[in-house]
Image: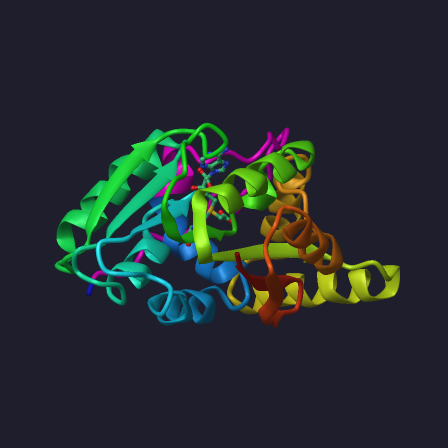
Amino acid sequence: MPTDPRDAIYANPLKEVGDFSFDEQVTRVFPDMIKRSVPGYDIILSHIGSLAQTFARPGGRCYDLGCSLGAATLSLRHCIPEDNTIIAVDNSAPMIDRCQAVIDRDTAKPRVELRCEDVQHVGIAQADVVLLNFTLQFIPVESRLALLEKICQGLRAGGLLLLSEKIAFESPDIQATMTEKHHQYKRDKGYSALEVSQKRTALERVLIPESRSTHLARLKAVGFSSVDTWFQYFNFAAFMAIK
Ligand code: GEK
């Protein structure tokens, strides 16, 4: 198995650190970047399919919103009925191009329809399962309620949303501790202090975390009947919401 190209985007000092974007450069190193940056990413991925399994009905439809290179789509695709369709959406053209190649190499049966589109504009209907695996955090805070309302409306009764996010803490002490633990995690995975610091600057205006209670309250408010956290590792959490 060839190894993933290594992320060194922020390894050298930059005169000015611009806002982070999912461009060609990021797409090329994305699997390495996300694995070394998001504590618990692999664990969450490994459980997405099995969590979703009992919610996906024969002939049903699932959505992966913000699919990147299709890692969550593949977890799902290997666990749901063969006659299901997955609609996988991302608004980064380089991500969608590479994702198509990933899907083409995979042999699981469910059909995958890739769309290069803003998740805020995509229609959702008759869904059994919707995935938002570290995507909502990139949507403007003021637009998140509308997106979650649309998802809840598009799910059938009893359908499942799996939402994973970087989270913020209400207590400043816990926030500071978790931020340091996360930065230590990245240094342990081989990122330098400069890389951690420049990446933090690049993400500051782009990735806006919210608290666990904000997420859970909003999921309830848009109409989900059961909501809870199923996983947390430092400042990264995964929620499930059943309509
Ligand atoms: C995984 N789920 O590997 N519309 C569509 N896509 C968007 C939007 C938007 N408005 N905003 C951001 N994205 C994946 C990981 S990464 C998470 C998801 C991360 C896309 C963006 O292009 C990127 O591919 C993805 O959401 C977020 O399971 O990098 O931390």
The correct choice, above or below, for 6 with respect to 187 in the image is above
**Residue in view at x 32 percent, y 54 percent:** 73
State the residue at coordinates (54%, 57%). 164
User: 108 or 197: nearer the eye?
Assistant: 108
| Residue lying farthest to the right in this orientation | 172
The image quadrant of residue 35 is bottom left
Residue 10: name its quadrant: top right
Q: Residue 31's x, y, as percent?
A: 38, 54
> What secondary structure prevails in the magenta region?
loop
Give how far across and how far down residue 202 sits, in percent.
62, 38
Q: Residue at x 24, y 65 (%)?
A: 78
Residue segment shown in magenta: 2-27
Q: Who is closer to the viewer here, 192 or 67?
A: 67
The N terminus sits in image quarter? bottom left
**Which residue is rendered at x = 33% and y = 43% of the image?**
88
Q: Is residue 186 left or right of residue 88?
A: right
Furthest toward the front, the residue is 157
Q: Position of residue 80 (x, y in %)?
A: 26, 63
Say if 156 sits above or below 82 in the image: above
From the viewer's perspective, tell me whether residue 107 is left or right of residue 232: left
* Closer-to-camera residue (68/215): 215
Q: Please say which color scheme the image uses.
A: rainbow
Q: Is residue 29 magenta?
A: no
How many marks do you count on the picture?
A: 0
| 24 horizontally vs 104: left or right | right
- Residue 229 percent coordinates (x, y): 61, 68
Q: Is residue 24 magenta?
A: yes
